[in-house]
């Protein structure tokens, strides 16, 4: 019988499997492009550039996320109840006290970011603080702290960068094909051209699907870990239900950081959002609640 413990281990294994596929995809794209242009340096460039992007995102991901969402860092005296909740749960989880930020937004939501547990940030909206009671807020904070403890915050940043990198290189290839720039001495150029065009079309779609799958698995894992931390899964389940019933979207919602939040910042109510939910980085609330309550 599946439990919170087995769900954690299964999600970890599946996530690493998906990440392995992602890296194989990048290598395959680089190889095809290098063969088509007859220049092995292209593959080296892809690898070096991806490393550069990863390093940049590693050091500045938290600052970028906070700026994009207009998050304001607070001190203990600014919100004693929130501060004490984060501090107590951090001690229970064996984590350093993260920085705390508040977003002035009526939409209920929360997120975690940072490169590691020593440089982590937990953010909540004013709407979340007004909507949830104490046990529900503890469930949400425990969920975000679990992202930190499970190293999800770093993983999410890396995946975002890689997805963006795949989109850039495939778009560049298609543009170069359109303008007829290729290696005329490559006898197999026609074959690699067809393969390259197919990869250029499918790779961004596949990369996005991997991004979605990893993000969804991580949300389930953080739900499970958060429930274990508070020993009260009903609190987080109730919070998720309240959050999902909110009809509006966040004022500064954007696709770049949407996956960092506990719930889709673009909203969950309405036919349009239900259809777009098929392509969301977040699993359906019903599935998360059922997993938490063991139904």
Image: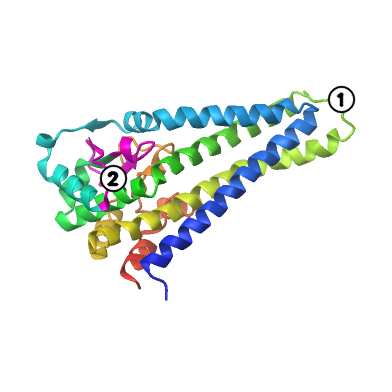
Which residue: 71% across, 27% down? Answer: 42
- Magenta stretch bounds: 93-121
Which residue: 79% across, 33% down? Answer: 35
| Mark found first going from the N terminus, 2 or 1 | 2
Q: Which mark is residue 110?
A: 2
Q: Which residue is mark 1?
A: 184
Dot 2 lies on which element? Answer: strand
Q: Quarter of the image containing the N terminus?
A: bottom left
Q: Nearer the viewer, residue 148 or 281?
A: 148
Determine whether, in the image, residue 67 is placed left or right of residue 77. right
| Distance between the alpha carbons at the discs numbered 2 and 1 | 53 Å
Task: Answer above or below: position of 1 versus 65.
Answer: below
Q: Nearer the viewer, residue 159 or 248?
A: 159
Q: Give the quadrant of residue 47.
A: top right
Question: Would you say residue 105 sits in the magenta stretch?
Answer: yes
Which residue: 31% across, 37% down? Answer: 118
Q: Give the quadrant of residue 5.
A: bottom left
Residue 200 visible, this orientation? no
Q: Position of residue 242 (x, y in %)?
A: 25, 57
Determine whether, in the image, residue 38 is placed left or right of residue 145. right
Q: Position of residue 277 (x, y in %)?
A: 44, 53
Q: Residue furthest front?
A: 94
How was the colour assigned to the protein in this rendering?
rainbow
Residue 121 visible, this orientation? yes
Q: Give the quadrant of residue 252.
A: top left
């Amino acid at each position: 019988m599946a439990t919170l413990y087995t769900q954690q281990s299964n999600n970890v294994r599946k996530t690493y499997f998906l990440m392995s596929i992602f890296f194989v995809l990048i290598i395959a794209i680089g190889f095809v492009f290098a063969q088509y242009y007859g220049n092995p340096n292209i593959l080296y460039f892809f690898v070096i550039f991806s490393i550069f992007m990863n390093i940049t995102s590693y050091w500045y991901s938290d600052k970028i996320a906070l700026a994009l969402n207009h998050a304001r860092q607070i001190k203990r005296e600014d919100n004693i109840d929130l501060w004490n909740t984060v501090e107590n749960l951090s001690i229970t989880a064996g984590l350093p006290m993260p920085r705390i930020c508040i977003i002035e937004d009526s939409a209920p939501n929360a997120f975690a970011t940072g490169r590691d547990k020593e440089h982590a940030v937990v953010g909540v909206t004013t709407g979340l603080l007004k909507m949830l009671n104490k046990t529900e807020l503890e469930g949400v904070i425990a969920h975000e702290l679990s992202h930190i403890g499970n190293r999800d915050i770093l993983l999410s940043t890396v995946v975002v960068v890689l997805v963006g990198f795949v989109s850039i290189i495939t778009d560049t290839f298609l543009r170069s094909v359109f303008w007829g720039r290729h290696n005329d001495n490559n006898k197999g150029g026609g074959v690699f051209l067809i393969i390259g065009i197919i990869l250029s079309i499918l790779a961004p779609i596949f990369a996005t699907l991997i991004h979605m799958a990893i993000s969804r698995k991580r949300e389930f894992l953080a739900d499970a870990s958060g429930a274990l931390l508070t020993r009260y899964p009903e609190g987080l389940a109730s919070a998720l239900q309240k959050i999902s019933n909110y009809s509006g979207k966040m004022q500064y919602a954007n696709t770049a950081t949407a996956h960092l939040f506990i719930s889709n910042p673009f909203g969950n109510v309405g036919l349009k959002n239900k259809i777009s939910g098929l392509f969301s980085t977040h699993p359906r609330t019903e599935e998360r609640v059922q997993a938490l309550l063991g139904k």
